[in-house]
Image (cartoon, rainbow, N blue to C red):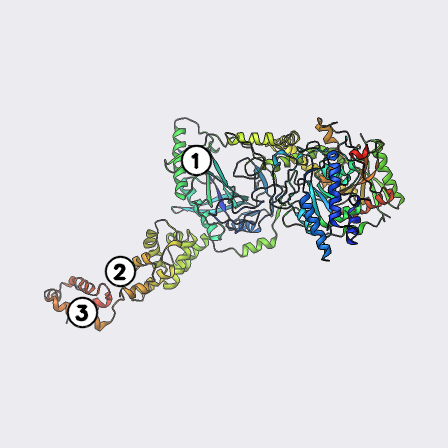
Amino acid sequence: MKPYELTISQALEALETRDLSAMELTKSCLERIEQTEEAVGAFVTLDPEGAIAAAEEADRLRAQNNTVGKLCGIPLSLKDLLCTKGVKTTCGSNILADFVPPYDATVVEKIKLENGIVVGKAAMDEFAMGSTSETCATGSPRNPWNTRYIAGGSSGGSAASVAAGQVLGSLGSDTGGSIRQPASLCGIVGMKPTYGRVSRYGLVAFASSLDQIGPLTRDVRDSALLMNVISGYDVRDSTSVDTPTEDYTQNLTGDVKGLRVGVPLEYFSGGLDPEVEAVVRNSIGLLESQGAEVVEVSLPHIDYCVAAYYLIAPAEASSNLARYDGVTYGYRKEADSLLEMYRKSRSEGFGAEVKRRILIGTYALSSGYYDAYYKKASQVRTLILNDFNEAWKSCDVLVSPVTPTPAWKIGKISDDPLSMYLSDILTLSTNLAGIPGISVPGGFSGDGLPIGVQIQGPHFEEGRLLKTAFSIEQALALKPSLPLIGKEAQ
Amino acid sequence: MEFETVIGLEVHAQLKTDSKIFCGCSTEFGAPPNTHTCPVCLGLPGSLPVLNKRVVEFALKMGVATGSEINRVNQFARKNYFYPDLPKGYQTSQFDKPIIEHGSVAIDVEGEKKTIGITRMHMEEDAGKLIHDEREPLSYVDLNRTGTPLLEIVSEPDLRSPQEASAYLKKIHAILRYLDICDGNMQEGSFRCDANISLRPVGEKTLGTRTELKNMNSFRNVQAALEYEVRRQRDLLLEGEDVVQETLLWNPDTGKTESMRGKEDAHDYRYFPCPDLVPVEISDEWLEQVRAGLPELPDQRRDRFINEFGLPEYDATILTDSRELADYFEAAQVECNQPKKVSNWMMTELLRELKGGSIEECRVKPEQLGGLLAMVEGGTISGKIAKTVFETMLETGQSPELIVKEKNLLQVSDESELLEIVQSIIADNPGQAEEFKNGKTKLLGYFVGQLMQRTKGKANPKLANKLFNQELNK
């Protein structure tokens, strides 16, 4: 087994026993990147020098027998919308192509404080707007299981880098499924925590009331390990919640006896792919066979999720992205007048999908339309939350598909925004309600593409999701195996 | 046709907190460009605002001081528009849930008292500043001011004349200064005022077309601009023309309002609740704390000056107009215990010398003025000498005691010393002494004058009168 194939927990053990050094592990990852990156395209920016220096430091700390951080020597990638001091943070956009933040995001500070190693910045849909990673201005990541297929999005680079064995884990962000969906399509674990559980300070905003940072990892234990590091209140984020954090690994017992597993009827209707349904039903069956109690529940307002989401998220985005005006930083096209400078900088700096959402959002907030669109959508949001609260009366978690289908071929729906929006239908409600959700590998399609299972739970019940996901993982015994990529595959 | 003027004012008061409203940067005025900035006030990607509680506290003070309703749950909203001094592309302000609504202040215009309604007050962040290159078509952006907390105070259209508007503005200014939450400096822009003004025929209920006036950076400018605009609109209406709804800039050099040429037209700010900030909740405890800590306000202080010091209302009103003036008065009065005399001196000598400047810059400290008046009262110096001493105080900032001592101006009240001089004057003026004895008592003034000349004005006048009467009648 090569070092890059290890999970975070395995690597930590090997590092602790000195069977492996951080330098060996980091170099192994960097070599893996060199071999696979052309095929996968997971990174916007690589920082091998920084990674090597951090690995040296990690080994030095261990050698000195100092108390080392919880991620000491672990190579990770970061979605390229997490601000990294001195390292470009492009958000997958031309408008920020040369933007170098003067500060670290809170989660990046935490990773560094725990001696984690940041190998590079992962590709993503421009400003996290997309479900396929095809709107990335800096090149699109591809699915490591079949590089003609999408990696999913918007945290496609994060998911691909972890699935391809380039890094051991990654942090992404999830506004409407952007962690869970690519995790599902790439066959890894992706957690979207409760809104407010992880500080958003330093996360370049897409839709502030929906955005949440979370881990993408090869197994459930690693997800818990990263959650232990990134969770918690932050005075710099007024929307982060001041509730105690926990050791999430304590939930990994495999014991789901008496757990009430809700199966939401509406998630299994319509255009659900039979292979996806079979994988999810199999996981539900496994939980039941381990003593969980399965109940059918209804979330009647799920049909309105797409409509509500595609008003609220673009509305907030239209305001959040107003700062990219070419004045203080970012792309500027010189012009004869201020208005022309704005017009040209923004027209040339943003891609089509971002412009589409800015237009939708601007319209939705316009005077005369605000009540009918933004305000109405906010009310629908309350109804969706009520649906979940009603469901929690009869179940502890909800188990469902993550996406209606496995990954599709690159280019299939990139000209069809509505189809792309509809593919988010199963993940959006989690963000609208602010609850946590996790995607855990459930199996493969006949074409060998991964299919994930989604678990949702009440606010701040990440531990319960990890427990359920761990139980599925154990029962399936799908040992995290890496796909063959590029030349390996031929 | 007779017209009625309708004016509403919008005041932007910079709240004098040490740090900005949403970050820890200093609010100090006059630092080198862009040195008081951080990722938050620069609007860098990923940065988030955190509300400065002092700003809320200051707003609450103003709300309580104006008898307003406090919205116990209020919310920030984003006001979206593009301008280079606004790095986020939106101003974080309050919209449909402001912190304060429905207050009022009392004004007094030439003895006529009136209550002016306050529609609302809300917290928001200030924008930066553009500095335009005079030679090239270039503008520079200074973001030091970005994020300085503002309290926007919107009046009801209750004001019926430029005089009332001015009185209202001064009252708002005074309250802010009394609360010590705004330094009130109009030149530096920490207290700014825009006005909405329209005319309508007397008796008409509906409002006429209004114009918005901007760029009035002194009390005098506000009144002058409004007076100009009243005349301009009246002339238009009398000629049967329409007033165009527009934003006008006051030009203090020409004394006219000038059109901004519709630049402000058709703004849709697309307000929506700011998702980065949670609603502001104000607890009973917090509000009670603010209420309990409220200082004496201008109206209360005026009444106290009338009751405690027996000052006429006119004096009390002028002295309490500004907190500094009232503080000065009290500090001076405590030294000499002569309120009316202090008031007279302040309203004549002192205010004349200040020529509209700040009393805090005056060389004469209140204790010194009080000390001077105490010396007059105690007979140490005469009232006439006091004026000379005061002039020296203004020039040098020295204490009256020192000046009197150095210039040897102590009143001569030693009877034997004065008697000698009195006798010598009578001896030198035998003719006048004879006339006096023959009943021309008016000549007493002449003799006292002589004495004052010889003593350089230092002789105690009462004693002088007594001695001359005594000696001339011998």
Q: Secondary structure at mark 2?
A: helix
**Badge number at residue B421:** 3
Chain of residue at mark 3 = B
Left or right for A24, reference B274: right
Side of A382 where B175 appears, left or right: left
How packed is label 2: few (under 14 Cα within 10 Å), some, or many (20 or more)? few
Residue found 80% across the figure and 38% down from its top? A187
Question: Residue at horizontal 85%, vertical 48%?
Answer: A254
Q: Which residue is mark 2?
A: B384
For disc 1, the marked residue is: B249
- Density class for disc 1 (Cα within 10 Å; few <14, some 14-19, many ≥20) is some
Q: Gap in Å between the C-alphas at discs 2 and 1?
A: 50 Å
Is label 3 in contact with label 2 (beta carbons under 8 Å)? Answer: no
**Residue A262 sits in quarter:** top right
Distance in Å between CA atoms under marks 3 and 1: 70 Å
Q: Amino acid at mark 1?
A: Leu
State which quadrant residue B256 falls in: top left
